[in-house]
Image (cartoon, helix red, strand yellow):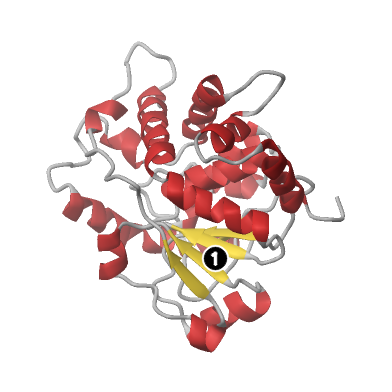
Amino acid sequence: MARNEFLTALASTPTDKPISPSDVAKALATPPFVNVPGAFNTRDLSHPPHLRQGLIYRSGVPKNLTTEGKALLSNTLHIKTIFDMRSPKEQTQTPIGNLEHDYGIKVVSLSWDTVPSTLDITDYISDPLNTDIWNGGAKGYSKQYFEVLSVYKTAYRTVLTHLLKTPNSPILFNCHAGKDRTGVLAALILSLAGVPDADIAYDYSLTRIGFEPERESLIAFIKKWKPELTEDTPGMREFSAVREEYMVRFLKDAREVYGGDEGEGWAEGYVKRELGFSGEEVDMLKENLRGASS
């Protein structure tokens, strides 16, 4: 996943500022983005030689798939399984629908093991004495993403088991915006594959571009979810942003918690200790991610 300077610059656009339609169109036609009609924030997670192309895709909820979009997923991308990691309420309110009969795509409903804690916006307030103006967001999201690792163990284990047992069956996984639950799983897979932190953070930041077509509806969703929060609420600026710094901080913290001896990465430590994979299974999973030709 080579860094694209145009995408990097566009990804720094504040969430409260729109991206021009022409720039969005250009960006979404640029890899790793995949233009799937009726879906948004869809990207190929590949990072050769660590993670092969066409195996894993990530996205926001593909709730408005057109006939063309469904056919593209099935016939062009050869996706046979979609893992939907939204909450039961989200899945009921905006279902993806049955794609198995006509398109051969199975939608697997995954959710949390326990209900996540309520958002505390004060977690995201930056320390004014810190020269990094995004330090609050980095701190807050690292805390949130550790909770994601804790409450989505079954979901993550299910996805990794699929990749272990059916290595040549492309998948797509999503949450609501394709940012947090999806972003943590993407970081886990990329880290397990040996992708450098900077490239994982770059992938994470591209969500700012990917959700632009749904930006207004996502803002409305947050206002309905937490009506007491406004753009002037302390911590809201940091919470609303999608910054590479956030993922860099999370990966650093994850390494301190899950990293093992003898160079074992945090992702390997997590999937062994928290998800129950053996060392042999982890080695096979890494091989499956790279592909037989590696």
Quarter-wise, where is residue 137 in the image?
A: top left
Q: Is mark 1 on a helix, strand or loop?
A: helix
**51 left or right of 92 in image:** right
**106 left or right of 282 in image:** left
Instruction: Give the residue at the far top of this rendering.
Output: 129
Q: Residue 63 in the image: state x and y as whole percent.
A: 39, 72
Whether residue 87 is visible here, answered yes or no, is: yes
Quarter-wise, where is residue 118 in the image?
A: top left
User: Which residue is nearer to you in this view: 240 or 6?
Assistant: 240
In the image, what residue occupies the spot 31% across and 36% down?
237
Above-or-below relation of 161 to 248: below
Q: Residue 266 in the image: state x and y as whole percent.
A: 59, 29
Quarter-wise, where is residue 97 in the image?
A: bottom left
Above-or-below relation of 128 to 34: above
Number of numbered discs present? Answer: 1
In the image, what residue occupies the spot 56% across and 41% down?
187
User: Which residue is nearer to you in this view: 207 or 290?
Assistant: 290
**50 left or right of 261 in image:** right
Q: Residue 136 in the image: state x and y as whole percent.
A: 35, 25
Residue kind at label 1, given as amino acid type:
Ala
Whether residue 11 is visible here, answered yes or no, is: no
Instruction: Give the residue at the far right of this rendering.
Output: 293
Q: Residue 25 in the image: state x and y as whole percent.
A: 54, 65
Name the residue beneath numbered marker 1: 25
